[in-house]
Amino acid sequence: MITYITLLRSINLAGHNKAKMVELRELISELGFGNVRSVLQSGNFVFDSDAESPSQFEDVLKEAVEDRLGLKTALFVRTAKEWAATVADNPFPDEAKSDPAHLLVVFLKGSPDRKMMITLEKAIVGREQIHAKGRQLYIVYPDGIGRSRLTNSLIERKLDTHGTARNWNTVLKVASLTA
């Protein structure tokens, strides 16, 4: 069995895409996944599967969430091994210790190339710092996230891919469930 992490984008944010985690856990279990657990109320799930690749279940899970619960959302899947590498590869360890709520990891569908990263870096007008590693983009928001102009839509536009962000505290909570 392989342990997978699935992140649902934009669940229970500002009253939109409301979903009960218990319903989502039940749905994931009914689809044949084992040891299903959730972290917080924002669509973070850990479960076990004998599938060797997320491509074997990602579309089925997305369709089931839409059909049964009426949620149109993107899914981002990683293995526990990939998640552990995300934690280990954090290029901002000082910020992770001193201000983990302002360190975000954006989990991307695709890996940005260097040219895309340069374009994104040029678009930054504040003190934010970024670093990409594979399908993850690490961002430090020293002045806070709410007022920053480095938004998810800007990131997606410049990197030509979709993403969903989690702060460092959540990344570590999810990691604790995969141990």
Image: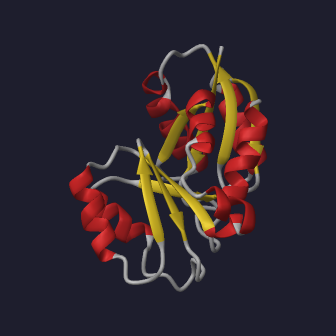
Q: Nearer the viewer, residue 70 or 151?
A: 151
Residue at the extreme left of the image, as rendered = 115
Task: Give the image quarter of residue 151.
Answer: bottom left
Q: Quadrant of the C terminus?
A: top right
Residue at the extreme bottom of the image, as rendered = 147
**Residue 70 at x, y = what percent?**
55, 51
Task: Give the image quarter of residue 93.
Answer: bottom right
In-image side of 130 versus 19 (left or right): left
Q: Residue at 44% x, 63% y: name it.
A: 130
Task: Give the image quarter of residue 115.
Answer: bottom left
User: How many numbered circles does the render carry?
Assistant: 0
Q: Nearer the viewer, residue 35 or 139?
A: 139
Vertically, is 24 above or below 11? above
Q: Quadrant of the N terminus?
A: top right
**Residue 48 at x, y = what percent?**
68, 23
In-image side of 107 versus 50 (left or right): left
Q: Residue at 67% x, 57% y: name it.
A: 168
Q: Residue at 54% x, 35% y: name it.
A: 78
Q: Residue at 60% x, 13% y: name it.
A: 50
Vertically, is 40 above or below 151? above
**Residue 46 at x, y = what percent?**
69, 35
**Residue 96 at x, y = what percent?**
68, 59
In-image side of 174 versus 53 (left or right): right
Q: How is the image coloured?
A: secondary structure
